[in-house]
Amino acid sequence: MITLNLFVRRTHLYLALFLLPWLFMYGISSFFFNHTAVLEDGISPWKVRFDRPYEINISKASDLRAVGARILQDSGLKGSFGVYRPDSDTLHVYWFNSWSATELTYFAKEKRLLAQDRRFRWDFVLKGLHGRAGFEQDSILSDGWAVAVDIVCVGILVWIGTGIYMWWKLRPTRGWGSLALGGGIALFVMLLPLL
């Protein structure tokens, strides 16, 4: 007969094991987000692939994803990408996978396309995995990653809930647990207005 306490303990245990690779990846990559200078070596992370004349019509009403897809196609690239337009003269198309990235910058006034490849570094890979999410890409693997991230998010919430349940059930741990919970909440609330 499985009791509620046993069910909660087993759920907490197996969720911890299931979430281990994700929490490991998010933990390490968060360190590199927070300490970007740790692996800086003075070498530019970008290497020019090409810088050539190029022309494409972009109006205010243009679908930027369609324009970005066309620029990628014309550059011999396909796969996941993001596109943004910081001003009327410049369009950035950021092509990426888990291991590498290429940034294409179109300068409309100059009718010029600059492509730069990012050199390989492990911190770039981990930060790319950390930030990768959403269902915008035309790839079943990207959609699979996005579904997995949703499952991990729900798993973390259940893991928290089962942890709180177990802590509350163990009377001797309530004092130290209250101190840990209160300290975590206080630190979060204290720092939140500073951001």
Image (cartoon, rainbow, N blue to C red):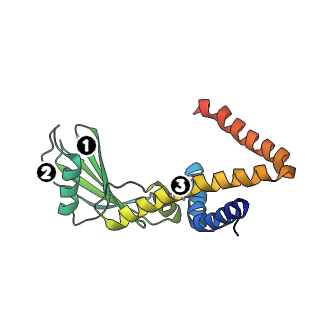
Gap between marks 2 and 1 measured at Cα: 12 Å
Which numbered circle lies on residue 154?
3
Q: Position of residue 20 (x, y in %)?
A: 61, 66
The amino acid type, in three-letter code, at marker 3 is Val
Gap between marks 3 and 1 measured at Cα: 39 Å
Find out whether the residues at labels 2 and 1 contact each other: C-beta distance under 8 Å: no
Q: Residue at x 85, y 44 (%)?
A: 175
Find out whether the residues at labels 3 and 1 contact each other: C-beta distance under 8 Å: no
Q: Quadrant of residue 146?
A: bottom left
Q: Is residue 86 above or below residue 17?
A: above
Q: Which residue is mark 1?
A: 90
Marks 3 and 2: which is nearer the front? Answer: 3
The residue closer to the viewer here, 25 or 175, is 175
Which class describes the residues within 10 Å of circle 3: few (<14), some (14-19), or many (20+)? Answer: few
The residue closer to the viewer here, 167 or 177, is 167
Q: Earlier in the sequence, mark 3 or mark 2?
A: 2
Q: Residue at x 17, y 61 (%)?
A: 74
Find out whether the residues at labels 3 and 2 contact each other: C-beta distance under 8 Å: no
